[in-house]
Amino acid sequence: MYLPQMFREERIEVLHQLIRTHPLGALVTHTGGALSADHVPLLLDAGPDGKDRLRGHLAAANPLCKADPGDLDVLVIFQGPQTYVSPSWYPSKQEHGKVVPTWNYAVVHVEGTLRFHRASDWLHTQVTDLTDRHEASRDLPWAVSDAPDDFVDRQLRAIVGIEIAVRTITGKWKVSQNRAPADRNGVARGLDATPTPDSAAMARLVRDSER
């Protein structure tokens, strides 16, 4: 990933928060001489050795699950807020007109080694933790235990667990840091007035870049 220093985000708590807020990772692998990308909701936590790890599961029919059972080097990409930025939002447009459109975004790249898990106990813990994490905010949260045991057992036989030991974690926050303060304020105001799914979140990131 091309990463100018001004766009580098190194605060580990900020990187972790993006992963937890946008947990659908693009899992990029290279097996059998070909690249592949799978989109997988992942949990971030600390492993027994205290190091970061990602946990998830794939359909057992996924060709990746047929790969060599040894550890695989992988890249996981987590996409945070992203928006188009109009040059008309820059006050400097009125001064000299030397402005162009751009795209703001926040992403986290995780590199590590992937290991497969097929034990039913591991899989049951994985799907329970993932479900509890995403049901927690609901008034009547659904739980894995709400389903019949034999049904859950059949579902577990149809998946394979994955665990990624994190080796590096890199963040890129391209949020108008390369613009003058007046232009950054103009971008934030423009985003406030633009009702897109990520505009409010990006406006906050642009304003936070001033701090």
Image (cartoon, rainbow, N blue to C red):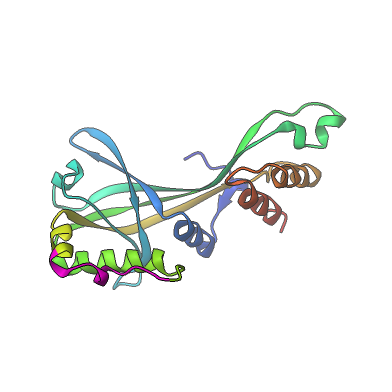
128 and 209: which is toward the camera: 128
Q: Nearer the viewer, residue 37 or 31?
A: 37
Residue 8 at what x, y percent from top left?
Answer: 56, 50
Q: Position of residue 77 (x, y in %)?
A: 41, 47
- Judging depth in this view, the residue of 9 and 125 nearest the camera is 125
Q: Is residue 148 magenta?
A: yes
Q: Is residue 162 magenta?
A: no
Q: Residue at 73%, 32% (x, y): give it.
A: 87
In this rendering, is residue 207 above or below 100?
Answer: below
Q: Is residue 209 left or right of residue 31?
A: right
Q: How many marks?
A: 0
Q: Residue at x 16, y 62 (%)?
A: 151
Which residue of the protein is positioned furthest toward the right in this rendering? 95
- Report if residue 13 is visible in the image: yes
Q: Quadrant of residue 31?
A: top left
Range shown magenta = 140-150
Q: Position of residue 107 (x, y in %)?
A: 50, 48
Task: Tell me if residue 184 comes above or below residue 35 in the rendering.
Answer: below
Q: Quadrant of the C terminus?
A: bottom right
Q: Pick the residue in front: 203 or 114.
A: 203
- The picture places residue 25, in percent across and down from the top left corner, at 38, 49
Question: Is residue 119 something that shows in the picture?
Answer: no
Residue drawn at x 71%, y 53% is: 207
Residue 109 in the image: above or below residue 139: above
